[in-house]
Amino acid sequence: MPLQKPWRDLDRETVGGAPDRPGVYELGDDDGTVLAVDHGVLRDELKTALAYGDGDRVRYAETHTLERARELAATHRNRLE
């Protein structure tokens, strides 16, 4: 099951508004196809994704801990395989 969050354009505004907290995120193309699922401190991760052009869109969910973010990312990756 995908993250139940709306897609946002992966741009400077989205990155600047992302929380400086742990979370899980999905990167997608313009059509909303999920290209990657990962976890980490959201603002830092999205800065990197934007800099490297890893996707056109993003959706994310905050978690309380990096461990929980890691677990959620693994669950979401499994559904893509």
Image (cartoon, grey):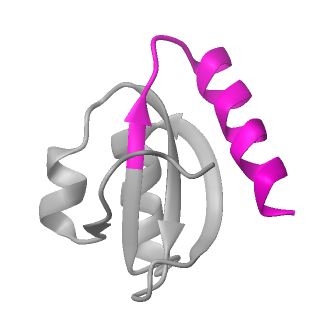
Number of numbered tags placed on the structure image = 0
Residue 2 in the figure: left or right of residue 73: left
- Identify the residue shown where x is 67% and y is 16%: 67
Q: Position of residue 68 (x, y in %)?
A: 62, 18
Residue 68 in magenta stretch: yes
Q: Nearer the viewer, residue 57 or 45?
A: 57
Q: Position of residue 57 (x, y in %)?
A: 37, 72
Residue 72 in the figure: left or right of residue 57: right
32 to 7, vertically: above or below: below
- Identify the residue shown where x is 70% and y is 46%: 76
Q: Seen from this angle, which residue lies furthest top?
A: 64
Q: On the image, which quarter does residue 20 sit in?
A: top left
Residue 68 in the figure: left or right of residue 30: right
- Identify the residue shown where x is 46% and y is 20%: 63
| Dominant secondary structure (helix, strand or loop) of the stretch shown in magenta | helix
Residue 42 in magenta stretch: no
Residue 73 in the figure: left or right of residue 11: right
Q: Nearer the viewer, residue 22 or 48?
A: 22
Q: Position of residue 38 (x, y in %)?
A: 63, 48
Q: Seen from this angle, which residue lies furthest bottom?
A: 30
15 to 41, vertically: above or below: below
Q: On the image, which quarter does residue 40 sit in?
A: top right
Magenta stretch, residue numbers: 60-81
Q: Which quarter of the rendering shows the C terminus?
A: bottom right
Q: Nearer the viewer, residue 41 or 69?
A: 69
Q: Position of residue 71 (x, y in %)?
A: 72, 26
